[in-house]
Image (tube, helix red, strand yellow):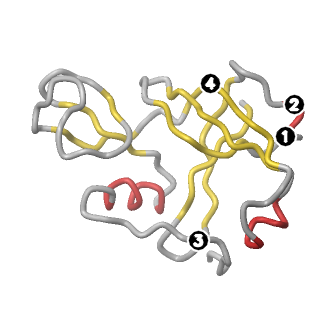
Amino acid sequence: MAAATSKPVPTPTHETRPYWDGCKAHDLCIQRCIECGNYQFLPRLYCTKCFGERVEWVKASGRAKVLSFTIVRRPVSPAFAGDVPYVVALVTLDEGPTLMTNIIGCPPEQVVIGMPVVVTFEDWTEEISIPKFRPV
């Protein structure tokens, strides 16, 4: 059972509902173009490579590498005060897309560019689980 959170919780839209449904099931889902095979994230109604209108949701491997990161030492709001210091990172999924996330499961000072990571999920509410990454 998820605990209530004081953090801002995402509101799924028509375009993002399959992503958040996947997260709720602890599956990282991204889009793949049926026409050209391109994987993409953020969710779109069309392919960002060929502009095809046939995209499908697929389960990603959950494996990635840290592309860039920063250590946050001052909370962006009181809701995050208990989390500092924490890592905000860009990770590149094995499938190709890059997404912004947090790296957890290790001291922030141990995060390095190129570090292999794997997805994990934090259940923020009964409906919303947030994907984060931890070292492999």
Q: Which residue is mark 2?
A: 110
Regarding mark 4 in the picture, which secondary structure is present there?
strand
The reply to whether the C-beta atoms of the residues labelled 1 and 2 are less than 8 Å apart is: yes
Between 122 and 41, the one nearer to me in the picture? 41
Q: Residue at 32% x, 46% y: name it.
A: 43
**Residue 42 in picture, x, y percent from top left:** 37, 43
Q: Is residue 72 above or below residue 38?
A: below
Residue type (three-letter) at the residue carrying disc 4: Leu
* Residue that carries the numbered disc 3 in the rendered image: 8
- Quadrant, the N terminus: bottom right
Mark 3: few/some/many CA within 10 Å (<14, 14-19, 20+): few
Tags 3 and 1 touching, CB below 8 Å: no
Quadrant of residue 108 in the image? Answer: top right
In front: label 3 or label 2: 3
Callout 1: few (<14), some (14-19), or many (20+) C-alpha neighbours within 10 Å?
few
In space, the residues marked 3 and 1 are separated at their CA atoms by: 24 Å
Q: Nearer the viewer, residue 2 or 69?
A: 69
| Among the two numbered marks 3 and 1 on one chain, the one whose residue lies closer to the N terminus | 3
Binning the other alpha carbons within 10 Å of mark 2 as few (below 14), some (14 to 19) or many (20 upward) gives: few
Instruction: In the rendered structure, find residue 106 and report the number of the disc placed on it.
Output: 1
Q: Provide the residue designation for mark 4.
A: 67
Q: Find the distance from the CA under tag 1 to the CA under tag 2.
A: 7 Å
Confirm or deny contact between disc 3 and disc 2 (CB under 8 A): no
Say which mark, if any, is on residue 118.
none
Looking at the rendered structure, the secondary structure element under dot 2 is helix
**Is label 4 in contact with label 3 (beta carbons under 8 Å)?**
no
Q: Is residue 25 above or below residue 52?
A: below
